[in-house]
Image (cartoon, grey):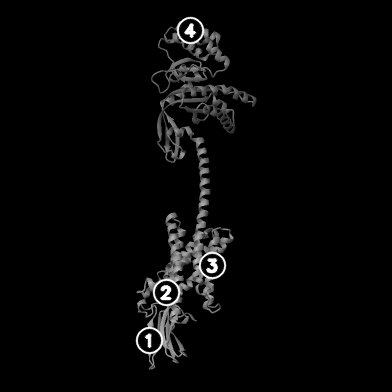
Amino acid sequence: MLEFGQTNHHYWLRITLENKANVFVSKLIEINYNNIDLIQFYEPLDDGSFVKTETGMLFPFATRKYKNRNFVFPIAIGPGQKKTYYFLTWTSGGLSLPILLWNQDSFILHNADVQHGLGIYYGVMIVMILYNLFIFFSIRDISYFYYVTYILGFLGIQLVLTGHGFQYLWPEYPSLQRNFYVFFTGICMSSALLFAKRFLNTKENIPIWLDKSMKVMVVAHAILVITPLLFPPEITVKIALLLSLPVLFMIPTASVMSFLKKFRPARYFLLAFTVLLVSGIVVVLRFINILGNTFITEYGLYLGSTMEVILLSIALADRINIMKREKSEAQAKTLEMQKILTESYARFVPKDFLANLGKESILDVKLGDQIQKDMSVLFSDIRSFTTLSEQMTPAENFNFINSYLGRMSPIIQRNHGFIDKFIGDAIMALFQKNVLDAVNAGIEMQRYLKIYNDHRNKQGYVPIQIGVGIHSGSLMLGTIGAEERLEGTVISDTVNLASRIENLTKIYGSRIAVSESTIEEVKRDGRFHFRFLDRVKVKGKKIPVSIYEVIDGDEPEEQDLKIATKDTYEKGVNAFYSNYFEEAKVHFEKVLNIFPQDKATQLYLKRLYPVTKDQSFDEH
């Protein structure tokens, strides 16, 4: 085999054959290399002249007398005859002249075996292209697109080098055969670099200089694709070969570096390109006559590239498994984080608030979500909190508020209520199942306050008192604010009235005050003790509102005294509103004789000195 390397010169070759047999001999001369632009075959005649046969990549495939991917020339030599044949060759790329002499039958059998083998090779490559293209369209991972274009480019190079592309795909276009090597090399190398960068995550796993060099070579090979439109093959082929050399260094180096960084996907990648590199080296060693002409050296590149695409497909499949596992772990972490966030949000927006809005998660809430409901509203407030807080540092204030609210919140939850908001030391809670739940919660809060005050007393702190106001009615539950800052709230006259009633507890010395709508349920239930307080005109209301006192949350002594004086107290109230002021004065004085600290009775007596017929009490 003659190797001339990259050359653009014309070379003459002379072959002399002698038939020593006594029979006529027919043979085939094959040049087992098809990428030659021009071959002129000179066959001698008996009269000393020559018959010239001209072929090569400069001519359409149909002009070949012997339809084969390589250049085949039939010869005939008579008994005892000696002939000398001449070849003139020229090509724009690398010139190789492996010349074989065949019997026709042997050549046909050998050619059939080669065709079958290469057919299997092409089939594997096409299957890999279609398989990975299908995966690309399924999962939209750009790595698969780069891999498909890489195989496509590599397959195109093989179709050019084997001559099958010229024989079957573009036989009428010699210019394509001459330029497609450069075209497919540009596609193959740029795609291989992009695939390697993506697959090996080179931005994280290799030095920046190597990563940037790979980017430069991607651009260079992308430009290479269009060079056949600008320059002849004599120039573009050499450029393609020069640009390919750095890639053969960069990709293995990047894969080794990624492997050494324990980047798992680099294992199969490194193995695949090692197989291809070794097979390429074997073929080169055959061309320079270091290794003999064996099956491995003859077809090593095809076997290596087949193994490479299969291993890379396995690598991609392994990468999918890694991505699935990472995705599953990420989803698990996301779900856990979402659960944590949802639980955290629930501290700011109660689950019951979301449930009333018909929302399963805080993520479903939008600005303007609202619903109208009949609910009970409970307001509680620490009396004289301003005076109390002035005696504490800011840190002590926060500790005190959190200690107090942390003890009262569970009581509301136990009674099927939820806290809509904390307003400093005040609590606003909503109850939707039963009005009596709100009343019972208020009573429990007052009873627990005695235990809490005992604890405060042991710590050296002054005791506190709270007032509770309850009103039931229709309200609007919803979200207000702006798109970037939402807040759940309740808007209704019911809420305002509950707040006003709580304020009245300070005036009447009552622990729990409720509206008339609430007391109706208390009357029907019959468990709780109550008494009428007054009919007052509160802020925002034109019509006076009747308020009542639930006394079950009072200290036991006070509760007993209020129960004992209830009949006398209510007679005095009825007399007062019937304008029988003298009679009212008698009843109220009887109450004070038994229970001198009854603030409600004290207020009525103050209003009787002096008293007018149309006197009433206004909240200020």
Q: Name the residue under label 4.
A: 585
Which element is circle 4 on?
helix
Q: Which amino acid does label 4 sit on?
A: Lys
Please state the horizontal and vertical placement of residue 551, each as a whole percent of the image.
52, 17
Label 3 vs label 4: CA separation?
112 Å
Location of residue 534 in the rendering, given as x and y in whole percent from the top left corner: 45, 15
Disc assigned to residue 275: 3
Callout 2: few (<14), some (14-19), or many (20+) C-alpha neighbours within 10 Å?
many
User: Which quadrant of the view contains residue 560?
Assistant: top right
Relative depth, front residue between 418 and 252 = 252
1 vs 4, front mark: 1
Taking 518 as reference, is 263 above or below it? Answer: below
Q: Which mark is residue 52?
A: 1
Residue at image location 46% in from the left, 87% down from the top: 15
CA–CA distance in space, label 1 to label 4: 146 Å
Spatial CA distance of label 3 from label 1 is: 44 Å
> Separation of disc 2 and disc 4 at Cα?
124 Å
Q: Earlier in the sequence, mark 2 or mark 4?
A: 2
